């Protein structure tokens, strides 16, 4: 598996991964409510994905194996992780963890000592097991009742 910067030609496959991840893995958050799903999936289009690639101050990464997109993640130059979605086909293979490490490394490269994110109900335990701690009151997005601000102090790897 390779984690690399996203390319325009990744847009369609990456959007499919994000959309499937939300629809199939985040049921605890959207509870199969079509209004919430429509809002959440609304910006997961190839056109918007392409705009994220060229957005100043944003790093959009993909995990790839055998030319297939397995996961999509994004981190801003300020250390805010805004995306971290894995294909349901490869869940529990350590790909999300590897992508999270790559996002944190990119944040460190940009001079951050801390990463922050808003976790779904679905990913709350995952982020906790990766050193993230609650950092504020829950705030829902897209009409969900779950959205947990979390942060983690980053440690520069020793050589």
Image: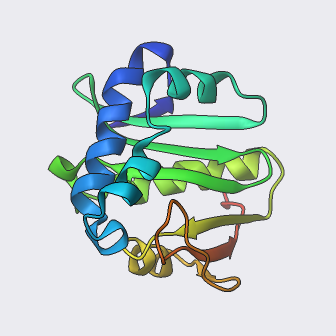
Which quadrant of the rendered structure holds the C terminus?
A: bottom right
Q: In this view, does 36 lie to the left or right of 49?
A: left
Task: Give the image location of residue 157, x and y in percent.
Answer: 66, 60
Q: How many labels does the image show?
A: 0
From the viewer's side, name the closer residue of 85 and 48. 48
What percent of the width, then of the height, locates residue 150?
A: 63, 76
The image shows residue 98 at horizontal and vertical percentages of 42, 53
> Is residue 67 depicted above or below 159 in this figure?
above
12 w.r.t. 107: above or below: above
Q: Position of residue 46 (x, y in %)?
A: 44, 23
Closer to the camera, 110 or 18? 18
Residue situated furthest top in the rendering: 9
The residue furthest front is 35
Q: Residue placed farthest to the left in the image? A: 89
Residue lying at the far right of the rendered structure: 111
Instruction: Say which residue appears at 51% left-offset and 20% top-offset.
Output: 47
Q: How is the image coloured?
A: rainbow
Q: Residue at x 50, y 56 (%)?
A: 100
Q: Considering depth in this image, is 82 or 31 the residue closer to the camera?
A: 31
On screen, residue 4 versus residue 37, left or right, reads: right
Q: Quadrant of the N terminus?
A: top left
The image shows residue 39, relative to residue 63, as above or below, that is: below
Work out whether 52 lies above or below 154: above
**Residue, x 64% and y 47% (percent of image)?**
75
């Amino acid at each position: 598996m390779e984690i690399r910067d996203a390319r325009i030609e990744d847009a369609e496959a990456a959007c499919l991964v994000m959309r499937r991840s939300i629809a199939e893995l985040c049921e605890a958050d959207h509870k199969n409510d079509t209004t919430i799903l429509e809002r959440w999936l609304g910006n997961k289009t190839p056109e918007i994905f392409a705009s994220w690639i060229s957005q100043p101050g944003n790093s959009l990464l993909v995990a790839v194996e055998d030319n297939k997109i397995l996961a999509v993640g994004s981190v801003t130059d300020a250390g805010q992780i805004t995306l971290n979605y894995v294909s349901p086909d490869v869940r529990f293979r350590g790909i999300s963890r590897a992508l999270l490490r790559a996002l944190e490394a990119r944040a460190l490269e940009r001079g951050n000592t801390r990463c922050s994110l808003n976790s779904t109900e679905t990913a709350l335990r995952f982020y906790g097991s990766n050193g993230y701690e609650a950092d504020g009151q829950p705030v829902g997005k897209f009409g969900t009742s779950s959205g947990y601000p979390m942060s983690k102090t980053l440690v520069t790897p020793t050589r």
